[in-house]
């Protein structure tokens, strides 16, 4: 029981370093009309293939179950012991390799990386070769392929792992090729992003915004002051009328009333002119701000459109074969999903690389 608890603790420790998905591919039958795999493609010299060298006794002791005859449902299954064995072998290789731990498991962005193994049977011959001595067929062998989920930003990281004896299945499409379209497209997007950030942080943009705020506050303050002064003047005229009504004769009062009306009209014209002037000042300041905001929005729209085109072009590069040897890329595969398009990173999981 203590050994089992220690083993579980070790598994937990390892799982925080690298999570694993495990698959076991059907050893037989292989439909030779729909597969492009040949005996020459899978052999002990294949850099991506790691042979499983277990004797019959070792297999019985460490695996203990016959090879599967049905491929497991990939989204909910218990991995076959031979797949678990392959995963454990890869864990040991990863933990023994400083280069891989540095470049894959403990990268700058996150600690841990999803790994996958795919157990395959190779080296068998379905057709009897009459030229072979004693009419013997080549015995099938077991091995496993290795892959990591996601991408590595530099080729040197993958090279370091190969030099350490760990060759992972290559990506379905290497977006980081030096002269590839994705690198050029990414450079364009980075340039747009830089332009957007430069404009967002531009002192001129902030100056225009501050000026607009100052104009808004100034015009509001002046308008409120003018309205308040107009109301005071209006009260003074009303009081003067009441005061002079009993003191002046009819003609004198009419003259006073007309003068006060003209004074009120003059103040209203002044307020109207002030309002028009403030409106013009505000519009000018708003246009100045809007010019830069429109430029910024145009850059963002351009970046979004180019990003989508680049992403679609990338999705077209991820082509896959179905069981009938038909080729499709990611875009039509996801056309009938709720999103209608692949999520970012589709095709870079471990399983597609392994298949």
Image (cartoon, helix red, strand yellow):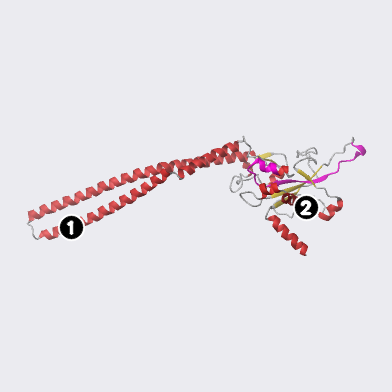
Residue at 65% from the left image edge and 50% from the top image edge: 106
Q: Which residue is mark 2?
A: 85
- Quadrant for the N terminus in the image: bottom right
- Please provide percent x and percent y for residue 67: 81, 50
Would residue 283 be visible to someone looking at this image?
A: yes
- Please provide percent x and percent y for residue 4: 76, 62
- Please provide percent x and percent y for residue 269: 22, 48
Q: Is residue 138 magenta?
A: yes
Q: Residues in magenta?
A: 132-160
Residue at the bottom extreme, as displayed: 1
Residue at 64% from the left image edge and 42% from the top image edge: 154
Mark in the foreground, 2 or 1? 2
Disc 1 crowd rating (10 Å Cα; few below 14, some 14-19, many 20+) is few
Q: Which residue is mark 1?
A: 236
Viewer-closest of 134 and 178: 178
Residue at 10% from the left image edge and 52% from the top image edge: 255
Find numbered disc 2 in the image and state the secondary structure of the residue it sits on: helix
């Amino acid at each position: 029981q203590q050994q089992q608890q220690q083993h579980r603790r070790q598994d937990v420790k390892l799982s925080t370093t690298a999570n694993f998905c495990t698959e076991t591919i059907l050893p037989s039958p292989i439909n030779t009309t729909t597969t492009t795999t040949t005996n020459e493609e899978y052999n002990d010299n294949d850099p991506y293939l790691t042979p499983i060298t277990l004797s019959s006794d070792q297999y019985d002791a460490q695996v203990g179950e016959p090879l599967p005859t049905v491929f497991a449902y990939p989204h909910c299954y218990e991995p076959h012991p031979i797949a678990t064995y392959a995963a454990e072998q890869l864990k040991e290789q990863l933990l023994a390799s400083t280069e891989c731990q540095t470049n894959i498991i403990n990268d700058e962005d996150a600690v841990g990386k999803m790994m996958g193994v795919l157990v395959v049977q190779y080296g068998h011959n379905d057709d009897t070769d009459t030229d072979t001595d004693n009419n013997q067929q080549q015995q099938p062998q077991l091995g496993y392929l290795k892959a990591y989920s996601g991408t590595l930003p530099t080729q040197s990281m993958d090279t370091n792992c190969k030099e350490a004896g760990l060759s992972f299945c290559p990506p379905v499409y290497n977006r980081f090729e030096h002269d590839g379209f994705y690198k050029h497209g990414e450079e364009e997007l980075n340039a747009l992003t830089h332009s957007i950030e430069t404009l967002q942080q531009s002192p001129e943009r902030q100056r225009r915004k501050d000026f607009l705020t100052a104009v808004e506050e100034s015009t509001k303050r002046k308008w409120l002051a003018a309205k308040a002064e107009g109301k005071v003047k209006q009260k003074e005229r009303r009081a003067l009328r009441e005061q002079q009504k009993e003191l002046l004769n009819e003609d004198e009062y009419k003259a006073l009333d007309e003068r006060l009306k003209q004074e009120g009209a003059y103040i209203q014209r002044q307020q109207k002119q002030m309002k028009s002037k403030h409106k013009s000042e505000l519009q000018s300041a708003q246009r100045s701000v809007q010019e830069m905001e429109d430029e910024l929005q145009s850059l963002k729209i351009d970046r979004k459109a180019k990003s989508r085109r680049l992403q679609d072009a990338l999705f077209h590069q991820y082509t896959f074969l179905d069981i009938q040897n038909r080729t499709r890329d990611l875009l039509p595969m996801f056309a009938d999903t709720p999103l209608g398009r692949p999520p970012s990173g589709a095709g870079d999981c471990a399983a597609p690389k392994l298949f």
